[in-house]
């Protein structure tokens, strides 16, 4: 089905392990985004990408790595997970036009023990 | 810091209009006002956006004051399914997204 999907939907890992969260969109949107959502903080932008091979930091990029080798995929990697990275992670995409709205995925709930 | 201010929570009777305010007193001339909502455990959903004129779509109406320092999202006939957290954000169209901030939003409860 067309849209934006995230995998896994739920993940439990241990401190120090590497974790990769996947995001895939079928609209060929230029822009893609990663947010984390924690109680009391709303949504905070981690990284975004304007096109394949172009990425930029958002509000809270530390501890995360992204790549965008293909337009439709935007994986987020926690190279050495910490407990403070326990959160719900949302991926989003939007068209290239300046006023385009963002379409969000269903989220990945990550727990770091 | 968030560039918008919203009340943390509101109640609305089912069938009535829900009016959600947003203060963005430091908005720049080229910044748009966007509204999203997030139903529990789901990803946020776009509702509407505007620059200076009032806007209406199938979901809601957006009223922006003449000085653009505040706006109101109107759900004309609220239903139980409109219970959600509503986010008001401002951003400049066509530029980087690093300053886009989703604050805590307004938790709207539609009451039967």
Image (cartoon, coloured by chain):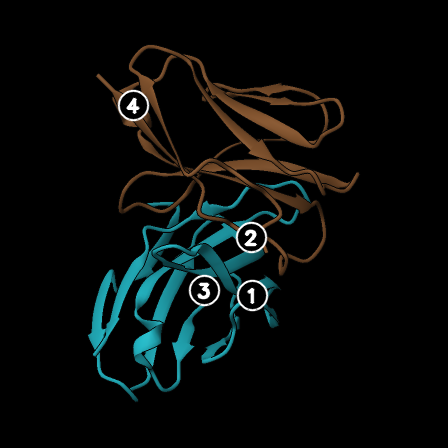
Q: Which quadrant of the rendered structure holds the C terminus of chain A?
A: bottom left
Q: Which quadrant of the rendered structure holds the N terminus of chain A?
A: top left
The Cα–Cα distance between marks 1 and 4, rounded to whole angstroms, is: 32 Å
What is the display colour for chain B?
brown
Q: Residue at x 27, y 47 (%)?
A: B41
**For residue A16, above or below residue A42:** below
Query: Mark 1 against mark 3, which lies toward the viewer?
Result: 1
Q: How many marks?
A: 4
Q: Residue at x 45, y 60 (%)?
A: A35
Residue A74, image x and y in percent? Answer: 46, 66
| Mark 2, residue position | B101
User: In the drawing, what numbered circle is on residue B110?
Assistant: 4
Residue A71, image x and y in percent? Answer: 53, 62
Relative horizontal placement of residue A112, taking residue B11 as reference (left or right): left
Asked where in the image residue B1 lies, by quadrant, the reply is bottom right
Q: Residue at x 58, y 64 (%)?
A: A49
Q: Secondary structure at mark 4?
A: strand
Q: What chain does badge 3 belong to?
A: A
| Mark 3, residue position | A73
Same chain under badges 2 and 3? The reply is no
Decide: marks 2, 1 in contact (CB < 8 A)?
yes
What is the display colour for chain A?
cyan
């Amino acid at each position: 089905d067309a849209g934006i999907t995230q995998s896994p939907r739920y993940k439990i890992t241990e401190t120090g392990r590497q974790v990769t969260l996947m995001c895939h969109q079928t609209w060929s949107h230029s822009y893609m985004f990663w947010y984390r959502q924690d109680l009391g903080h709303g949504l905070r932008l981690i990284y975004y990408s304007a096109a394949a091979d172009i990425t930029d930091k958002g509000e809270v990029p530390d501890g995360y790595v992204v790549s965008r080798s293909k337009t439709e995929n935007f994986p987020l990697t926690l190279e050495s997970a910490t407990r403070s990275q326990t959160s719900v992670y949302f991926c989003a995409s939007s068209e290239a036009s300046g006023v385009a709205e963002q379409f969000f995925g269903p989220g990945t709930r990550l727990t770091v023990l | 810091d968030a560039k918008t201010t919203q009340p943390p929570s509101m109640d609305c009777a089912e069938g009535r209009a829900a009016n959600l305010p947003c203060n963005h007193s430091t908005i720049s001339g080229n910044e748009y006002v966007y509204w999203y909502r997030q139903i529990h455990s789901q990803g946020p959903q776009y509702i509407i956006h505007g620059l200076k004129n009032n806007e209406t779509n199938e979901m809601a109406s957006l009223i922006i004051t003449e000085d653009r320092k505040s706006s109101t999202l109107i759900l004309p006939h609220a239903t139980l399914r409109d219970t959600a957290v509503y986010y008001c954000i401002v951003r400049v169209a066509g530029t980087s997204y690093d300053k886009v901030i989703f604050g805590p939003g307004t938790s709207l409860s539609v009451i039967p």
